[in-house]
Image: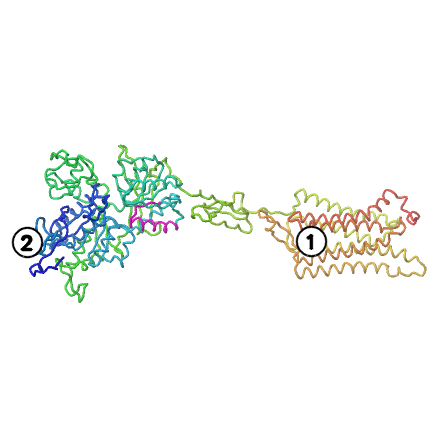
């Protein structure tokens, strides 16, 4: 608008600045809905010299986008034909080409909301002498206002939609997008007038992260066109993928117009990466350039994951079907059919194309001909465009395939259908408002034929309706409930593309929103999904160890340590087995530990049992001999009472050895150590008494010596009892404070539970051994003092020799005992006991038995008394 003219006559007029835009489609109505569709794409701007207005060259006409445009006009006509919806309002449309370009879209949107004079209506013919000459139109404002759009359906791109919102937002003009999915647009504080029938990328990204995780693709390449749509989508994917253990092998952006250098950079990244799965956030046109480069390099075996922008773009299949075989992608909700749309699309005839340059261009491109009087001015870079043969007028859309008339994948078209109905139902609610009960100040309502855009957006935000049987509603951000079909690109028998639904993602489902039917998927290579991982999965029995400085998907597999297991693939930690179990060789299962103890039935146990029984029997046999030959001088001379006591307890010592064999229990452990300690204390006390008697017997033969009165029978018994009583007291204190007990030892060898007797109190155990050592030292000292006594009667040398063996055994026992465990410790115990007992038995009694049984001639007083 421009009212800055000096003449008062022009204050009532509007000045239109700019060039006339002939490439639009308009139909009048009470409410005119604006529409923006990317009918052309891949704009290339010429180098600006700043001397003339820059021109935008458009090529690559989109038949698919034309179907979208026609869906909007069809839906408006359908609503106008209904008697139950907006019966008193007629909807019109004003549609422009956005060219998927921000400057072009901004210019088109301003034409929609500001209006444009009728074609050929020039102000100069009326006000030639009253106003300044301009490059525009100067017309009556009434002629302009009738084409103003209060709401715009568009645009397809997220970046373009953001630019439009920043320009139109201050005027509170609603923008309803049918294909802009960037999550950034959900920010209602920044974009309060934005709504869409396209789900937010937030949900698509969650679906993609779940998809790659489902097939075990933890190492994926992520690429995207340099746009707000791709930047926000890739950022969201990198954040979401962390929750599913998925890593990006690389992220790469490429320009909208892919130069050869930019294409080479992208292809190098793809070719030299170990990832074979690629997620591409781009449109159909950018994907075409990439596929051409991949074909030239003969790169195969790639698994493409399509964003919703090209998940159903069938035009890509024509030249790159081999490369796209097995592609997976999420497509927005599909309408099985929109009744009447197919007929509306194919009703075009050569005679009906002159009302729109868009339709004329589509017809000429489809049939490669030139219409008579065509409004089309786009040559698409073709030198012979104007030399084409004239159209015959008999062309029929049913005879050729075109994305325009293909209604098998009505997804974006369905979004446009719902977007138009959103506006219609909002207008219906606005029309049904009752004065005094309206949502605005003081309960006022809006005028259905003269409302403000901000009043319409209020009703749009609260819209809730059904379209083709589907409930349509929106959240607080103006986003619809997300639903996607998982599409698989398969080759039909005739070589054409067959888009097969192999699953779906429904954000309204609780828990797992992604459902996949693996059995119907066709893969690029073979019958299985390719593998794309930085590191192979760690099998059960190992755990994941991250590599420093690398993504979490790059790791090493380290075997679990003994006693730990992992029973799942890619376990982060190994779990400890319970106290009575241990890890198997594969470290993937806890198995019961083997139990170890010295058994009666194994070789070592049998051998020690035999030795113990033999020693006890030998002791009893010697007692029998001594009883049988009790009247002989040799037996009488050897202190019968102490000898029998010593032999009896030697027999006990041998039998104690049997207590150490078999499964230990608490009561058995409490008997083992004190029986063992007391028995040896009594035996050595007897030896000490015998040695003292022998020694004192010879000392008492000296003149005036009365020493023997202190070594009578009573004194000998008292000394033996006293020596044994001390050990009994030590054992009693030991049993009261910390007695020996049975224990399951799991520390020495992990896979084995050692059933053992533990001393309880180490002080008590070593006190018992120490006291025995003290008695042995005293016995050895006595034997040393008696070394010069007469040979035939002298037992001292045998006692001394037995004590030396005793010391050798028990001194050796200490380091061996400390360094062994399990049944070998028990064997050491028994061996020490048996060796000590056999040393005493053989050194002291066997020589006498030899004389009694085999050399009876020496068993006489004369021989015994000889020196």
Report which residue position mark 2 lands on: 128
Question: Regarding mark 1 in the picture, which secondary structure is present there?
Answer: helix
Q: Residue at x 28, y 40 (%)?
A: 289
Q: Can residue 467 be seen in this view?
A: no
Residue 645 image position (x, y, % from top left): 80, 54
Question: Regarding mark 2 in the picture, which secondary structure is present there?
Answer: loop
Q: Is residue 280 visible?
A: yes
Gap between marks 1 and 2, in whole Å?
131 Å
Q: Residue at x 37, y 51 (%)?
A: 239
Residue 672's disc is 1
Viewer-nearest residue: 273 or 662: 273
Residue occupying the far right of the picture: 703
Q: Quadrant of residue 709?
A: bottom right
Colour scheme: rainbow
Q: Is residue 551 magenta?
A: no
Viewer-nearest residue: 377 or 609: 377
Q: In which quarter of the image is the N terminus?
A: bottom left
Viewer-nearest residue: 579 or 611: 579
User: Which residues make up the magenta segment?
Assistant: 222-243
Viewer-nearest residue: 84 or 447: 447
């Amino acid at each position: 608008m421009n009212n800055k003219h000096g003449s008062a006559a022009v204050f009532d007029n509007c000045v239109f600045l700019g060039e006339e835009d002939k490439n639009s489609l308009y139909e009048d109505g009470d409410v005119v809905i604006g529409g923006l569709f990317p009918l052309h794409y891949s704009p290339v701007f010429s180098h600006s010299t700043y001397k003339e207005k820059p021109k935008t060259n458009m090529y690559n006409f989109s038949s698919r986008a034309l179907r979208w445009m026609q869906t909007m006009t069809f839906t408006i006509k359908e609503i106008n034909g209904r008697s139950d919806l907006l019966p008193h309002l007629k909807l019109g449309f004003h549609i422009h080409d956005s060219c998927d370009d921000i400057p072009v879209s901004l210019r088109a949107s301003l034409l929609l909301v500001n209006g444009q004079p009728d074609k050929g209506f020039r102000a100069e013919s009326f006000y030639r002498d009253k106003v300044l000459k301009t490059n525009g139109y100067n017309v009556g404002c009434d002629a302009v206002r009738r084409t103003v759009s209060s709401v715009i359906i568009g645009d397809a791109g997220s970046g373009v939609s953001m630019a439009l919102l920043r320009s139109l937002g201050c005027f509170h003009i609603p923008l309803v997008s049918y294909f802009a999915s960037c999550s950034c647009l959900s920010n209602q504080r920044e974009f309060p007038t934005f709504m869409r029938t396209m789900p937010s990328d937030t949900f698509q990204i969650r679906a993609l992260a779940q998809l790659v995780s489902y097939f075990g693709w933890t190492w994926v390449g992520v690429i995207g066109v340099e746009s707000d749509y791709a930047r926000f989508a890739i950022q969201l994917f990198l954040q979401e993928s962390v929750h599913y253990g998925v890593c990006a092998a690389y992220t790469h952006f490429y320009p909208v117009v892919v130069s050869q250098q930019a294409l080479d950079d992208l292809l190098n990244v793809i070719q030299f990466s170990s990832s074979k799965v690629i997620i591409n956030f781009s449109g159909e046109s950018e994907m075409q350039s990439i596929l051409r480069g991949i074909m030239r390099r003969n790169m195969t075996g790639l698994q493409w994951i399509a964003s919703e922008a090209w998940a159903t773009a069938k035009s890509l299949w024509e030249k790159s079907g081999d490369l796209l075989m097995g592609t997976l992608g999420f497509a927005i909700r599909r309408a099985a059919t929109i009744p009447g749309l197919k007929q509306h699309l194919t009703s075009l005839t050569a005679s009906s194309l002159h009302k729109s340059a868009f339709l004329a261009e589509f017809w000429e491109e489809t049939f490669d001909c030139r219409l008579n009087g065509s409004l089309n001015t786009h040559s698409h870079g073709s030198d012979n465009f104007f030399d084409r043969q004239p159209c015959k007028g008999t062309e029929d859309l049913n005879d050729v395939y075109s994305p325009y008339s293909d209604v098998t994948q009505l997804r974006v078209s369905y979004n446009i259908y719902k977007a138009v109905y959103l506006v219609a139902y909002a207008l219906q609610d606005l029309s049904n408002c009752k004065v005094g009960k309206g949502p605005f100040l003081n309960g006022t309502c809006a005028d259905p034929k003269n409302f403000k855009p901000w009043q319409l957006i209020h009703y749009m935000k609260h819209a809730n309706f059904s379209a083709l049987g589907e409930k349509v509603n929106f959240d607080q951000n103006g986003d619809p409930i997300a639903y996607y079909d998982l599409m698989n690109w398969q080759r039909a028998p005739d070589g054409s593309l067959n888009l097969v639904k192999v699953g779906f993602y429904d954000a309204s489902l609780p828990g797992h929103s992604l459902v996949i039917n693996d059995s119907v998927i066709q893969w690029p290579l073979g019958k299985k999904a390719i593998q794309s991982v930085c590191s192979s999965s760690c099998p059960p029995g190992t755990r994941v160890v991250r590599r420093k400085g690398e993504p979490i998907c790059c790791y090493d597999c380290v075997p679990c340590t003994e006693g730990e297991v992992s029973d799942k693939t890619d376990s982060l930690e190994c779990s400890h087995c319970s106290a009575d179990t241990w890890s198997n060789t594969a470290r993937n299962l806890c198995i019961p530990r083997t139990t170890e103890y010295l058994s009666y039935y194994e070789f070592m146990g049998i051998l020690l049992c035999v030795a113990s029984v033999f020693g006890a029997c030998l002791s009893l046999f010697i007692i029998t001999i001594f009883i049988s030959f009790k009247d002989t001088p040799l037996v009488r001379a050897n202190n019968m009472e102490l000898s029998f006591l010593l032999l009896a307890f030697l027999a006990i010592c041998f039998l104690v050895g049997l207590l150490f064999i078999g499964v230990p229990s608490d009561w058995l452990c409490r008997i083992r150590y004190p029986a063992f300690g007391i028995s040896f204390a009594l035996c050595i006390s007897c030896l000490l008494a015998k040695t003292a008697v022998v020694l004192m017997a010879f000392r008492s033969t000296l003149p005036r010596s009365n020493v023997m009165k202190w070594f009578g029978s009573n004194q000998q018994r008292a000394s033996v009892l006293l020596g044994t009583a001390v050990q009994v007291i030590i054992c009693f204190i030991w049993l009261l404070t910390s007695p020996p007990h049975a224990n399951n030892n799991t520390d020495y060898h992990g896979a084995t539970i050692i059933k053992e007797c533990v001393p309880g109190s180490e002080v008590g155990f070593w006190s018992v051994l120490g006291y025995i050592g003290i008695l042995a030292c005293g016995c050895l000292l006595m034997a040393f003092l008696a070394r010069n006594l007469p040979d035939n009667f002298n037992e001292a040398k045998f006692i001394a020799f037995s004590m030396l063996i005793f010391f050798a055994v028990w001194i050796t026992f200490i380091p061996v005992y400390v360094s062994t465990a399990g049944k070998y410790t028990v064997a050491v115990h028994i061996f020490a006991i048996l060796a000590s007992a056999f040393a005493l038995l053989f050194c002291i009694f066997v020589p006498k038995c030899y004389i009694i049984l085999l050399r009876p001639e020496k068993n006489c007083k004369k021989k015994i008394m000889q020196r």
